[in-house]
Amino acid sequence: MGKISASLMCADLLNLERDITRLEGLGVEYLHLDFMDGQFVSNITFGTGFVRACRRAVKTMALDIHIMGFVPEQYFEKMEIGPGDLVSFHYEACENQHEVIRLIRERGASPLLAISPDTPVDVLREFADEIDGVLIMTVYPGDSGRPLVPGSFEKLAATRALLDECGYPEKPVEVDGCVSWVNTPHMRDAGTELYVVGSSSVFEKGSTYEETVPRFRAIIG
């Protein structure tokens, strides 16, 4: 069964604690936090202190932390990375991927390797034994609301096939980018298990979470 990771950057930024409580009440499994350093991507979002604050705000949701920054390991202590966290970092943002994976696991968290649209799926093969899943960017990272990159459904399916071929059918494929009402069924059929939802589905304007979360759950269920 698919799981939902709600992207906090798409919530009401002036009422985040209220929105977190509502999403938890609807059974959303993960709170997705996009950390951007302004260098690997041009945007800047939440800081490390904000990530720590979110730990105190959530009760049932786990944190799904997506680090879009160079030298990702420099943030682990400041974010208080620990058991129960999913931590994604970008293959393209460092050259010591094996060490970063080890450091995440050392802190009791689950390491996921993220790859951007132009990075081929085959780079994942080297890390399949060490990671707990893969995050596939189906838009170019940096901002919400960007269009789906052509070939994304095929890339998701290829990632699922690679993990299965390596003997890890239990390791999830997570999708981040343009997870819309139209695209989600195709992402599901490609083997996606974890969905980063944003402005094109659960957080769409004019609808409530009470309407959108059950609707999305029905599609991925």
Image (tube, rainbow, N blue to C red):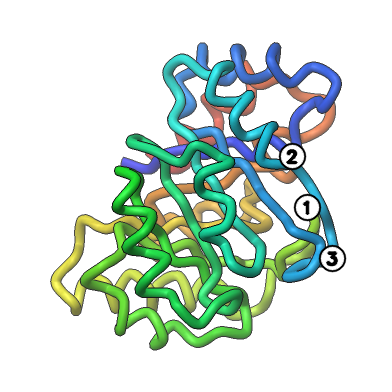
Between residue 26 and residue 189, name the one nearer to us.
26
Q: Earlier in the sequence, mark 2 or mark 1?
A: 2
Identify the amino acid type marked 2: Met
Give residue 144's position: percent from left, percent from top.
Answer: 78, 52
Is the residue marked by circle 3 packed among few (<14), some (14-19), or many (20+) residues within 10 Å?
few
Give residue 206's position: percent from left, percent from top.
Answer: 83, 26
**Mark 2, secondary structure of its residue:** helix
Give residue 81's position: percent from left, percent from top.
Answer: 46, 41
Q: Which residue corresponds to mark 3? A: 42
Distance Cα–Cα, label 1 vs label 3: 13 Å
Distance Cα–Cα, label 2 vs label 1: 8 Å
User: Which mark is on residue 217?
Assistant: none
Q: Residue at the location (39% across, 60% down)?
A: 173
Which mark lies nearer to you, 2 or 1? 2
Q: Residue at the location (30% across, 43% down)?
A: 108
Distance Cα–Cα, label 3 vs label 2: 15 Å
Is the residue marked by circle 1 packed among few (<14), some (14-19), or many (20+) residues within 10 Å?
some
Give residue 136's position: percent from left, percent from top.
Answer: 51, 66
